[in-house]
Image: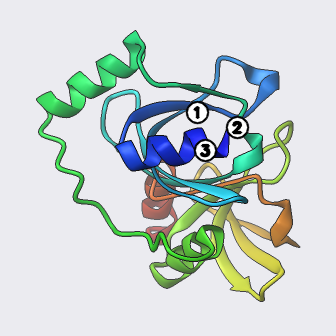
Amino acid sequence: MINILKKLCKDGNLIAIYTNRSYYDKFSVGYILAVTEENILIQSLSPRGEFDGYSVIKTDSVYRLETDEMYLDKIRRLLALKGYNNEFPAIDTNGDILINIINYAIGNKQIVTICIDEDASDIIGYIVDFTGDKVKVLQVSEYGQNNGETIFPLQEIIKICVNDTICMDLDILYRNN
């Protein structure tokens, strides 16, 4: 699978990526920006054909990819009609892309969504401490309010998203409490 992912990254194809076998109809859409043995960096797109942040997912969690299908054609058309120009905040694609996205979120004070268990609720909030193997997050509720802190090992991260529309909305609510 990794060779296919690297080819899709090189070719710049819009893709649908499936990672959760329990929810086979749930997938991410976007462009692969980087692939390593451990992780994939994706520039995500919303169902409305708009930028929806960046995601890093574990490479070995990918079980299915789609490249040429009607839904992706709809997204491509929306991108073209809306004048998509790919000018979004840059994420470092060199080195450890998981560490890079964490450092990006910390440096830009961005809310993240972190999945450490496919069958549990995501952790949403600001990364307030990162010490190499532990991540500490100030959690933000769905109403934009402080929801306590949590700490977990870095290797538990299955997926992390930053700059998506949900996180940006929560950031606005939290900063204006």
User: Would you call the spot at circle 3 few (<14 residues within 10 Å), some (14-19), or many (20 or more)?
Assistant: few
Which amino acid, mark 1? Ile
Percent position (x, y) of residue 55? 55, 53
Dot 2 corresponds to which residue?
62
**Residue at the (59%, 62%) spot, across then down:** 112
Depth check, front residue: 145 or 125 = 125
Dot 1 corresponds to which residue?
17
Dot 3 corresponds to which residue?
3
Which amino acid, mark 2? Val
Farthest residue toward the top?
70
User: Would you call the spot at circle 2 few (<14 residues within 10 Å), some (14-19), or many (20 or more)?
Assistant: some
Depth check, front residue: 1 or 124 = 1
Dot placed on the residue nearer the N-terminal end, 3 or 1? 3
**Residue at the (72%, 85%) spot, across then down:** 129
User: Would you call the spot at circle 1 few (<14 residues within 10 Å), some (14-19), or many (20 or more)?
Assistant: many
Secondary structure type for disc 1: strand
Quarter location, residue 56: bottom right
Depth check, front residue: 128 or 69 = 69
Q: Is residue 154 left or right of residue 46?
A: right
Secondary structure type for disc 3: helix
Above-or-below relation of 112 to 106: above
State how many labels appear.
3
Which amino acid, mark 3? Asn
Distance Cα–Cα, label 3 vs label 1: 15 Å
